[in-house]
Image (tube, rainbow, N blue to C red):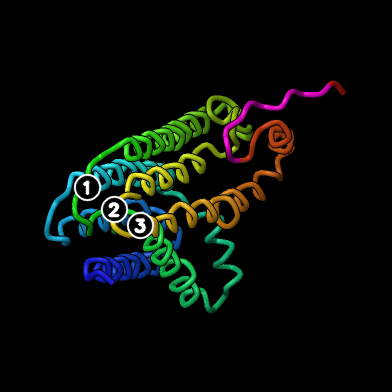
Amino acid sequence: MDPVIVRSLLLIIAYFTAFFVVAQIIRNNSIVDIGWGIGFVIVAWFSLFSAGYLTTRGLIMTGLVTVWGVRLFYHIIKRNWGKPEDFRYANWREEWGRYVVVRAFFQVFMLQGLMMMLIATPILLVNVSPDTAFGVMEMFGLAVWLIGFFFEAVGDKQLADFLQDPANRGKVMKSGLWRYTRHPNYFGEATMWWGLFILGLSVQNGIFGIISPLVITNLLLFVSGVPMLEKKMMQKPEFVEYAKETSVFFPWFPKLKRDR
């Protein structure tokens, strides 16, 4: 394994260990979410400069990751600042009881570190590879990334604006991008990583980067993204009706209401 990739793995372990220590001090394991985006930014720049040479593809890849990671970091900080532990982590804290510290270390922080390492695969492969020419495939990958970033950034902004309006308290967001998918931000997140995989496909061993979009798409669709949020939101009758008409993940036109 390339030494840069090994050092990047060690950096990720140290990074999430630091977040774990802080989380135990403030009794809030959900701060791990704050470190998610910025962690990729740190790994991207670290691997870019550790490889010993800068490439155009590496700079573009690292730049895209930086834009995404900084925006996500700001969004989560703004959303969570001053609020109690997220309901997912609070539920785990209650379930795990006296083993919460040990289980949080391995099942929250180290697990997120492992996921980061897998998802960052295209970044690392690009940053440790010699430069190659840009072509149609790379432009396609960039276009896919831009589509994903649009859905995540705009979807987050639309939801934040909706929740800030007191008139919408208790209501369900159903306009803008949310009219076409119940989770535009999750769709955008997955799409961006597919774009980065395509962008790095032509470098040496670039095909192995497919682990990244496969992992993040699986996590969002079947593990910690859509299922957990849907379970919570389905307690609202308005969301149940909204779900009948709106695609769960991939954007599509709403189903027409049938006459009752």
- The kind of residue tagged 2 is Val
13 sits to left or right of 153: left
Real-space CA distance between mark 3 and mark 1, rounded to the nearest whole angstrom: 20 Å
Q: Amino acid at mark 3?
A: Ala
Earlier in the chain: of badge 1 and badge 2, it is 1
Q: CA distance from mark 1 to mark 2?
A: 7 Å
| Residue 64 place in picture, x, y as percent | 29, 42
Labels 2 and 3: the sequence-earlier one: 3
Magenta stretch: includes residue 256: yes
Q: In this rendered view, identify the residue nearer to me: 37 or 47.
A: 47
Find residue 148 and report its horizontal and vertical position in percent: 43, 37
Label 2 residue SS = loop
State the residue position of label 1: 132
- Whether residue 48 is situated above or below residue 92 in the rendered picture: above
**Identity of the amino acid at label 1?**
Thr
Q: Quadrant of the C terminus?
A: top right
Neighbours of disc 1 within 10 Å: few (<14), some (14-19), many (20+): some
Q: Position of residue 48 (x, y in %)?
A: 19, 55
At x 57%, y 75%, the residue is 97
Q: Are marks 1 and 2 in contact (CB under 8 Å)?
A: yes
Looking at the image, residue 195 lies above or below residue 28:
above
SS of the residue under disc 1: loop
Decide whether the magenta segment is chiefly helix, strand or loop: loop
Reading the image, the residue beneath label 2 is 203
- Determine which residue is flagged by label 3: 120
Residue at 57 percent of width and 25 percent of height: 175
Residue 164 in view: yes
Classify residue 124 as left or right of residue 27. Answer: left
Query: Residue 5, image x and y in percent?
Result: 27, 66
The segment highlighted magenta reads 249-258
Q: Which callout, 3 or 1, points to the residue nearer the camera? A: 1
